[in-house]
Structures are given as C-alpha cells and as structure tokens.
Amino acid sequence: MPSAKALEAEITRQVTARGAGKTICPSEVARALSDDWRDLMPAVRAAAADMAARGEITVTQRGQPVDAVAARGPIRLGLP
C-alpha cells in the first residue's frame, strides 16, 4: 500500500494537471497507484480529507463541499 505522502503527491499531481475549475475522481488516483485500486479507495479518501483540511484541495459532491471520509457516494477532488 502506498504511503499517505505518496497518495497526497499523486492527488496533487492529478489535480494540478487537470487545472483550475476541473476535478478528478479519487479512483483515478487509486488506479494510478495500484492494480488492486478498490482496496486503496479508503486511504485515498483519507489523504484527500487531510489535504482539504489544510486547504490544499477541495472535496465536493454535486458541486458542494463535503468531508471526503464521511461523504457517501461519488466525490470529486479539485484545486481550491
């Protein structure tokens, strides 16, 4: 399993590459780091929640800010 630092680095890389005003799915991060990506999803969401708490990214669901860990269903990650 990738470290939290590796997860955060991949999230940063992908949201930066996508650009302002656009978002990524957390599964894109998990798929980039593991063939067994589904098992990685809770760790990706946890890393996203930490990054959002520090103001490094935004986490949204249907365009509204949400907690990455508590949210049920699909979420999106983007630049603040």
Image (tube, helix red, strand yellow):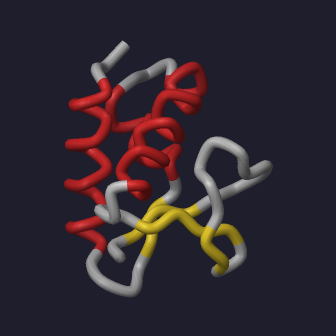
User: Image point 53% across, 41% down: which residue?
Assistant: 45
The quadrant in which the C terminus is found is bottom left
User: Image point 24% across, 55% down: which residue?
Assistant: 12
Residue 78 position by quadrant: bottom left
Residue 57 shown left or right of residue 65 in the figure? left
Residue 13 shown left or right of residue 62 in the figure? left
**Image coordinates for residue 70, horizontal then vertical, percent:** 71, 45
**Image coordinates for residue 32, horizontal then vertical, percent:** 34, 37
- Which residue reaches farthest right? 72
Q: In the depicted view, which residue is nearer to us: 7 or 68?
A: 68
- Which residue reaches farthest front? 54
Residue 52 position by quadrant: bottom left
Does 8 appear above or below 62? above
- Which residue reaches farthest top? 1
- Which residue reaches farthest bottom? 21
Does 68 appear above or below 24? above
**Image coordinates for residue 63, horizontal then vertical, percent:** 64, 80
The quadrant in which the N terminus is found is top left
User: Image point 31% across, 19% down: which residue?
Assistant: 2
> How many numbered marks have been drawn onto this rendered protein structure?
0
Does 32 appear above or below 65? above
Residue 11 shown left or right of residue 24 in the figure? left
User: Image point 28% across, 41% down: which residue?
Assistant: 8
Residue 21 shown left or right of residue 60 in the figure? left
**Image coordinates for residue 65, horizontal then vertical, percent:** 61, 72
Q: In the depicted view, which residue is nearer to us: 54 or 14?
A: 54
